[in-house]
Image: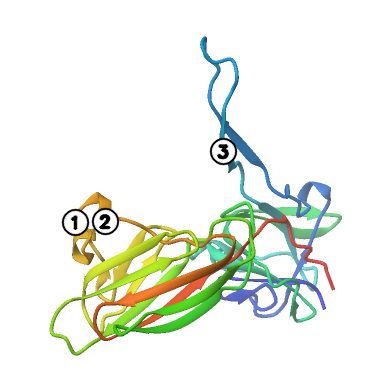
């Protein structure tokens, strides 16, 4: 069984109706290689009064980029229909997607990439036509399967969940919740990470309406669309705060003012380590 990829709700095995696409490398110039990761230090400048640079921090300086090729399993040329179908599959969605690599019907690794294809070109090698593809990951690391934790909190107490983050980078979760109460008034919810004291407090909440907190992109929405900050009780800049997860164990508490709060926390661990071996067995 040849290795293949799954991307944008389809696979390289079945994207064409009468033949499979074989995942391969043409030569070293198009091998699937990338640095493990690179970080760029952030330092102060030299001045007339300061002859020693002060280290402020660091940032990732590039994302992972993969280059690999497809050939048809019958080694025939790619028709205009084939190229159009593959291009629509890889580029048509326009948003970043999960890229998984499979071999022998088994995923090569539980880790995966997230990003977009940025290039495709046609090349003939010793009589065989190949499509050379470039994929750009959205970060310098891989991702692990999403962890989903659900919990219920009541106004008579609070709920607590333990979240294990096994990477050495902060993780920004997605939080979804709905409140239910018999009180004829707005509700409020406070979610606190006791490990690092980050928290988010929302008020003026409508019971029975699902709210979603995207901490990675700093967006709060509900069933009716994106929320204005003033609609969730954030009247001043000092009210704005976001929760995040530290490496290691995190203890997250939820408190609801009235009734019950059903809450779901979703997050992905970030895996430093570079490129997966797509030809693993």
Q: Earlier in the sequence, mark 2 or mark 3?
A: 3
Which quadrant would the C terminus be assigned to in this image? bottom right
Sequence-wise first label, 1 or 3: 3
Along the viewing direction, whichever of 276 and 162 lies nearer the viewer = 162
Element at badge 1? loop
Position above or below: 222 against 171: below
Residue 107 place in picture, x, y as percent? 73, 76
List x then y, in percent, for residue 44. 53, 25
Nearest to the observer: residue 243 or residue 28: 243
**Quick one: label 2, few (<14), some, or many (20+) residues within 10 Å?**
some
User: Helix, strand or loop at disc 3?
Assistant: strand
Name the residue carrying label 3.
57
Please identify the quarter of the rendering in which residue 278 is found.
bottom right
* Direction from residue 233 to residue 161 in the image, left or right: right
Please state the horizontal and vertical placement of residue 147, each as a whole percent of the image.
Answer: 56, 75
Viewed as shown, does residue 130 lie left or right of 253?
right
Q: Are marks 1 and 2 in contact (CB under 8 Å)?
A: yes
Of 77 and 281, which appears nearest the observer?
Answer: 281
Q: Position of residue 166 (x, y in %)?
A: 64, 65
Answer left or right for 37 relative to 164. right
Q: Residue at x 69, y 64 (%)?
A: 78
Residue tagged 2: 239
Crowd rating for badge 1 (residues with CA inside 10 Å; few <14, some 14–19, many 20+): few
Q: In what element is the residue under mark 2?
A: helix
Residue 235: mark in rendering: 1
């Amino acid at each position: 069984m040849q290795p293949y990829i799954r991307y944008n709700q389809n696979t390289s095995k079945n994207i064409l109706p009468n033949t499979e696409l074989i995942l391969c490398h043409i030569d070293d110039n198009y091998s699937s290689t990338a640095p493990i990761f690179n970080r760029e230090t952030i330092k102060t400048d030299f001045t007339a009064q300061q002859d020693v640079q002060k280290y402020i921090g660091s940032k990732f300086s590039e994302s992972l980029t993969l280059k690999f090729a497809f050939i048809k399993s019958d080694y025939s040329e790619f028709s205009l229909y084939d190229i159009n179908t593959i291009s629509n599959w890889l580029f048509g969605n326009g948003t970043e997607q999960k890229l998984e690599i499979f071999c022998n019907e088994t995923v090569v690794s539980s880790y995966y990439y997230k990003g977009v294809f940025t290039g495709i070109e046609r090349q003939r090698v010793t009589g065989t036509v190949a499509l050379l593809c470039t994929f750009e990951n959205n970060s310098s690391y891989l991702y692990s399967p999403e962890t989903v934790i659900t919990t219920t909190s009541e106004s008579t107490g609070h709920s607590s969940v333990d979240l294990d983050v096994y990477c050495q980078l902060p993780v920004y979760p997605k939080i979804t919740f709905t409140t239910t109460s018999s009180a004829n008034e707005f509700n409020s919810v406070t979610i606190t990470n006791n490990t690092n004291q980050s928290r988010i407090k929302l008020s003026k909440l409508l019971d029975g309406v699902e709210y979603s907190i995207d901490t990675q992109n700093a967006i709060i929405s509900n069933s009716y669309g994106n929320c204005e900050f003033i609609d969730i009780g954030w009247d001043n800049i000092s009210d704005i705060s976001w929760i995040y997860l530290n490496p290691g164990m995190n203890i997250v508490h939820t408190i609801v003012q009235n009734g019950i709060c059903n809450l779901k926390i979703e997050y992905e661990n970030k895996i430093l380590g570079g490129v997966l071996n797509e030809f693993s067995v």
